[in-house]
Amino acid sequence: MNLDSLVVLGATGSIGTQTLEVARRREMAVLGLAARRPSAELARLAGEWPEAAIVVTGATGDEARAFASDVGPDRVHFGSAAMAELARTPAIVVNGVVGIAGLSASVAALEAGNRLALANKESLVAGGSLVTAAAVRGGGQLIPVDSEHSAIFQLVGGMSRDHIHRIVLTASGGPFRGAARSELEDVTPARALAHPTWKMGDRISIDSATLANKGLEVIEAAVLFDVDVDDVEVVVHPQSLVHSMIRLVDGTLLAHVGAASMRHPIEYAITHPGRAAHTETPFELAGLSLTFEEPDLETFRALALAYAAGRAGGSAPAVYNAADEIAVAAFLQKRLGFLEIPTIIEHCLEHVPVTKPDTVDEVIAADRDARELAASLIAGSC
Ligand code: MG
């Protein structure tokens, strides 16, 4: 397993950008960079890392030709299959892709025996058992980058599974914590995007406001740590300092505490089981108050629906995720109200048949069915 080099998928996004900061600081080789768009930023990164193979998954023919002649035709490849192939490069593969497009790359990285630093939620939510099976088959190592799952991964360490009673995921509660349903009827995208503690991409910011993000994380945690969704509790913790906790069978509660920064989980996934030494100001405890409250499942129905999808299993989490993604996009375009996001998810969970996918293609089919149904619901055509 090559742990000295990096391949970064979603290189120009939030996780990708922060991963490349870690790469610069640690002077690591970058052997591959993938992004959806043939942007000027990707061309700049290609210039900074001349060893890296470049993949663009979402370019038109004209854009592809222009980008290839700009960056160098021999090192640029196009399409999702090229991204999955890039994930087989012997390196630590950081998957910061947003959406189901990240799933086949996760499977490929693990099948090739690589360490996969995983920030693509869809890989575990939609592709759960396929991803864990790929790790077993290829000997790859899966390390979560999501802050909560990184915290749990670090807490669990080499602990015997028999000692772990339950997982406790913390949630900031998002910008509408404490709000009543009636106050959320006229929420605008701008208000929903204003997350109190984390700076993130648009979809995950809206998902934090609806608690759908926490719902996806409950499903992710169940897959990663091999527990039922009902053994994953959610507690609202507005300070976002406790990144998550585990309850042990003897009643002990272990917590992972630190400043809210994605730098730590990204760097930990790269250095595990080692740790980077830092000179930054130590985390100050004096004067801190940590508060915890129960999530409001009536107002934030998306969280309750995620448990339902997790219990249903099979393709239901993929349907949940796809329906949410379409609903969030429509909300951002002001075509759907904030409170209608969970309504769309619920309808799709009820009407898209649950299958037991054995292949990535079958997961993608469930994803597509849910997207089509969600889109037609939003368009008012059914
Ligand atoms: Mg998270």
Image (spheres, grey):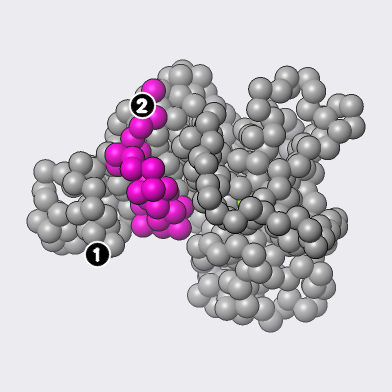
Q: Is residue 299 left or right of residue 372?
A: right
Residue 125 position by quadrant: top right
Question: Which span of residues is magenta-colored?
Answer: 1-30
* Residue shown at the point (40%, 37%) measured from the top left: 93
Specify which label sits upstream in the sequence, 1 or 2.
Answer: 2
* Residue shown at the point (38%, 43%) measured from the top left: 26
Type of amino acid under label 2: Asn
Type of amino acid under label 1: Ala
Residue 190 spot, x, y in % from top left = 57, 78
Task: State which quarter of the image contains the N terminus.
Answer: top left
Q: Residue furthest right?
A: 251
Could you say which disc has been placed on residue 2 in the image? 2
332 or 198, which lies in front?
198
Residue 168 spot, x, y in % from top left = 77, 42
Instruction: For label 1, count other residues whose C-alpha is less than 10 Å away and answer few (under 14), some (14-19) or many (20+).
Output: few
Above or below, comparing residue 254 to residue 378 in the picture: above
Above or below, comparing residue 35 to residue 6 in the picture: below
Could you say which disc has been placed on residue 40 in the image? 1
Task: State which quarter of the image contains the C terminus.
Answer: bottom right
- From the image, state whether disc 1 or disc 2 is nearer to you: 2
Residue 73 spot, x, y in % from top left = 11, 48
